Image: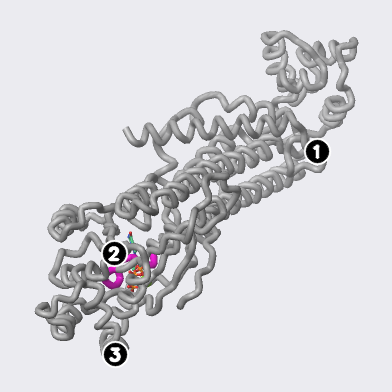
Amino acid sequence: MSSIPPSPSPADSTAVQIVPAAGSPLRLAVVGHTNTGKTSLLRTLSRNPDFGEVRDSPGTTRHVEGLRLLAAGAPAIELFDTPGMEDGMALLDYLDVLAPPSERLDGPARIQRFLDSPESLGRFEQEARVLRKLLKCHAGIYVVDARDPVLAKHRDELAILASCGHPLLPVLNFTHSPDQRIEEWRTALARLGLHAIVEFDTVAPPLEGEDQLYEKLSLLLDSHAPILRALKQDIAQQRSQRRQDAFVLVAEMLIDIAALRLSAPSQAPELEAAATSLRELARRREQRCIDALLKRYNFRSADFPNHPLPLQGERWEMDLFHPQALKDVGIHVGKGVAAGAMAGATLDVFMAGISLGAATLLGAAAGGLWQGADKLGRRLLGRLRGYQELTVDDAVLRLLAIRELALVTALERRGHAALGPIDISTLMQGGDDTLRKEKLPEELLEARASPQWSTLADNYQPSTRRSTAVKRLADTLAHLHDASRRQRET
Ligand SMILES: Nc1nc2c(ncn2[C@@H]2O[C@H](COP(=O)(O)OP(=O)(O)OP(=O)(O)O)[C@@H](O)[C@H]2O)c(=O)[nH]1
Ligand SMILES: [Mg+2]
C-alpha cells in the first residue's frame, strides 16, 4: 500500500485544542474519470502544491497515493488519490459476464469477483486499483469535470463505483469555466440517486468550499460526523490564524519602511546615492514580506513573479516636528500650535536654514522644554551641518499597503492545485478607497517619527510601543481588507 505522508496542513500550525479525532481516521478514496482533477483536489485540500503529479493528460496518476489531514494534531481523514477510470463501459460489460445479474450477487460481491479475476491484473488494472481502494474506504469522492457532457461512460463508471457499497459524494470541478454544465450534471447525478453534491473548483475554490465538502460528507457518514466537525473547526481556526499572521506580516513591513530614514550630505550626488539605497532597502523589505506571505499560505515564491516597486516618490524628510516626535522627546505643545509650527519649521530648516518658525521652536527647546535633546538634537545638528534625511514617500506606502492586501486576497482565493502565476492586477483596482485617499493610518504616521522602529535601521530598537503599533495596524489592515471584499462583492 502507498505510504501516507502527514500533510503539512490544514493543521499546519498552532491548532486549537478541540475534540481530538476519536478512533481511526475516516478513509476517503478520491475517484473519477481520468483527467478530471482528482490529484488537484488533493493538493487543494491538503494545501500542498507538491502532492502527486498533475498534468493536463489522461492517466497521469498510475498508483494509489494517500495523505492524512490532522485535526487538533490527531489524524482526522486519510485521502487516497487513485488512477483515473478509463474504460467503465467495457468493465461493466465484463462484470455482467463474470457475475451475471441472474446470480443476484450484491454489489461488493460482484466487485470482489472481478478483483479475483485475471483481468484485474491485465486490461482493467487501473480500474482494479481504484475499486480495491474504494472497498477499503468509508466513502468515495467522485470528481467530475463539469465541462464534460454527461455520457454513458460516466453513468457506467458511477454504477460500478456505487457497487462498492459505500457512499459517493460527487465534487463538480472546473466550475469557473464558461463551458461548465453544472445543471446537466446535477440532474444526471440526481437520477442516479446522488443528491448531495459539492461545487469546488480546485484552482479557485470558494472560500467556504471545504466547509461545504465536509458538511455534506458528514450527512452521508453520520457516524464520522464528530471527526468531520473537528476537522472543520480546525480548518476555520487555521484560516483565521493565517489571516491574522498575514496582516501582521504586512504591518511589520509597512512600519519598517515608514520608519526608515537615510541621511546624506545635501550635495546632489550623495543624495542621489542615498535615494537609490532607500529604494533598494524598501524593495528588498517588500520582497521579504511577499516571500513570508507566500510561505504562510503554502505557496512557492515562483508562484508570484517579481513586480518591481515603482519607488519614484522618496521625499525629503518632513516630519522632524511631527507632534508625536515632539511628544516622544518630551516637548509638549498644543495640537494646533504643533501642527502649524511643524509645517513651517521643517520646511524652514531644509530650505533656508534657521528661519523664524524653526528658530521659535529651537528657542523653546533651548529654553527648557527640551528634554530629548540627545535624540532629536543629533538629528537637528546633522541637518544644520548640511545633512538631510530621506524617507519613503506616502504614496509609496499607500501603494505597498494596497499591493500586499491584494496579494492576501489572491492567496486566500487560490487553490493549491493552481499552476499559473498569481495575478493581482485586477485586485489592486477598485475596492475600498481609504488607503488611496484618506490620511495614512496613525501607526504609520507615528512610525514616520520613530526611526528606531525600522528593523532596517542600525539603531533599531524593539519596543512595546512598536509592537502595539504593528498589532493595531494589522487590525486596521484586516478591516480595510474586509471592506474592500464587501465592496467588490456588491
Ligand atoms: N482551470 C482548472 N484546471 C484544473 C482544475 N482542476 C484540475 N485542473 C487541471 O486539469 C488537469 C488535470 O488535473 P489532474 O489533477 O492531474 O487530474 P487527475 O484527475 O488527477 O488526472 P489523472 O491522474 O490523469 O486521472 C491539470 O492540467 C490541472 O491543472 C480546475 O478546477 N480548474
Ligand atoms: Mg491524478
Residue depth check, mark 1 versus mark 3: number of the one nearer the observer:
3
Q: Residues within 10 Å of mark 3 (few under 14, many from 20)?
A: few
First to last magenta residue range: 32-40
For badge 3, the amino acid type reads Gly
Q: Which residue is mark 1?
A: 265
Secondary structure found at label 3: loop
Q: Which residue is mark 3?
A: 122
x 39%, y 50%: residue:
225
Q: Earlier in the sequence, mark 2 or mark 3?
A: 3
Examine the rendered structure and indicate whether residue 212 appears above or below residue 347: below
Q: Quadrant of the N terminus?
A: bottom left
Q: Is residue 393 visible?
A: yes
For badge 1, the amino acid type reads Pro
Quadrant containing ligand 1 reads bottom left
How much space separates mark 2 and mark 3, taking CA atoms? 25 Å
Q: Residues within 10 Å of mark 1 (few under 14, many from 20)?
A: some
On the image, the x and y values in percent for residue 374 come to 89, 26
On the image, the x and y values in percent for residue 71 come to 51, 52
Label 1 CB less than 8 angstroms from ligand 1: no
